[in-house]
Image (cartoon, rainbow, N blue to C red):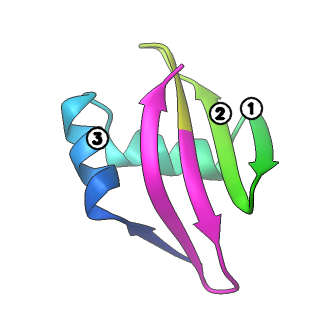
Amino acid sequence: MNIVFTSHAEDRINIRKITKEEVIEAIFYPEKITKKYEKYYFTKKLQKGTIEVCCERTERDIKIITVYWV
C-alpha cells in the first residue's frame, strides 16, 4: 500500500513540527481509528502530544490530507 502526502499535509507537517515517520506510525499503529464522511482519522499518542491524521483510502493508496495536534 502506497502512502501519498498531499502538499497541504506536507505543509502542515512542517508547520506543526511533526515528522513523516510519526505520521506513518500513526497510520500503521494507531490507538484509535474513526471513519467520518468517507475519511479515516488515525489518532496516535506521541511523546510530544497526540496527533490525528486525516486520510482517504483506496485499494492501493492511503492519501494523507492533513495532520494536526489534538
Q: Which residue is mark 2?
A: 43
Circle 1 Cα neighbour tier, 10 Å, few/some/many (<14 / 14–19 / ≥20): few
Q: In the image shown, does 20 or 37 lie closer to the viewer?
A: 37
Residues marked 1 and 2 touching at CB (< 8 Å): yes
Q: Are marks 3 and 2 in contact (CB under 8 Å)?
A: no
Which comes sooner in the sequence, label 3 or label 2? Answer: 3
Residue located beneath label 3 in the image: 12
Q: Which residues are magenta?
A: 53-70
How busy is the neighbourhood of tag 2: few (under 14 within 10 Å), some, or many (20 plus)? many
Q: Which label sits in the foreground, 3 or 2?
A: 3
Q: CA distance from mark 3 to mark 2?
A: 16 Å
In this view, the mark in front (1 or 3): 3
Quarter that holds the C terminus:
top right
Q: Residue furthest top?
A: 48
Q: Residue at x 54, y 43 (%)?
A: 53
Q: On residue 31, which mark appears?
A: 1
Type of residue at label 1?
Glu
